[in-house]
Image (tube, grey):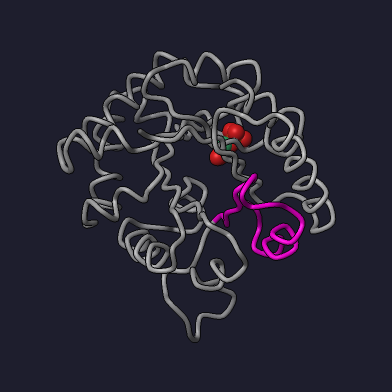
Amino acid sequence: MRKNIVAGNWKMNTTVAEGVALAKEVNSAVAAAKPNCDVIVCVPFTHLVPVAEAIDTAILGLGAENCADHASGAYTGEVSASMVASTGAGYVILGHSERRQYYGETSEILRAKVALALENNLKPIFCIGEVLEQRENGTFFDVVRTQIEEGLFNLEASDFGKIVLAYEPVWAIGTGKTATAEQAQEIHAFIRGVIAGKYGEEVANNTTILYGGSCKPSNAAELFAKPDVDGGLIGGASLKCADFMGIVNAF
Ligand code: PGA
């Protein structure tokens, strides 16, 4: 059966020292709480090595927030999937809406990143989600379906099985405006159906689908109670150990 996961996405926040301190605090809290879900922190590239050294990755999973779309070579400023894997990280967020929107990441680029992540034994946390206009004009089902088809449906079923999906409505990210639990369930069930249509019921039922967008301790339990919501990708609330643990403990 699929795993429940709560993953933090620190984005471009914290210095190395602050990040190491936060990771240690979260690691201790998770060790004490023994939650009913896997817990992961996805951190800036600069933080991967010191955080990997500071935590027990068997207790607290570690991920990057991005990786390059090329394996190696003359790509100044980029960080490859193999470099990320060599730090001890096991996950990588790919296709976050901020990367799609501000850095022009297309489905073609994302297919290359997913392939490189998988080659290097990193589990992609692949983000999808509509903007407000698409929610309001009712095209969001098509938008999300297309993002999944274009980004992931070139994969064999065995590789698709390694993907964690994160549905993040862009209008809910960092806005304080959360999708209702009913809205989340509706689109998560739709996403599972899209996967079933391509790879069959078993693969679909084994796929973890996270919700992201202003998830906090006060709304996590209601969201996670929905049958197709398998956890959360947490931005702002992952930067404070108590808030993050409030979400983890919602399971
Ligand atoms: P938020 O961000 O929790 O701050 O809304 C979620 C995300 O972008 O992953």
Q: Nearer the viewer, residue 193 or 149?
A: 193
Q: Nearer the viewer, residue 132 or 47?
A: 47
Residue 59 drawn in magenta: yes
Q: Which residues are magenta?
A: 43-65
61 on left or right of 20: left
Going 27% across and 31% down the picture, which residue do you hit?
A: 192
Q: Position of residue 118 (x, y in %)?
A: 38, 62
Going 47% across and 35% down the picture, which residue do you hit?
A: 170
Q: How many labels, in total?
A: 0
Instruction: Place residue 187 in its image quadrant.
Output: top left
Going 60% across and 64% down the picture, which residue do you hit?
A: 88
Q: Quadrant of the C terminus?
A: top right
Q: Position of residue 74 (x, y in %)?
A: 50, 86
Q: Quadrant of the N terminus?
A: top left
Going 56% across and 16% down the picture, which residue do you hit?
A: 221
Q: Position of residue 34 (x, y in %)?
A: 65, 31
Vertical relation: 45 (above or below) 225: below
246 on left or right of 65: right
Residue 79 drawn in magenta: no
Q: Position of residue 243 (x, y in %)?
A: 72, 28
Q: Residue furthest bottom?
A: 74
Vertical relation: 219 (above or below) 158: above
169 on left or right of 30: left
View quadrant of ligand 1: top right
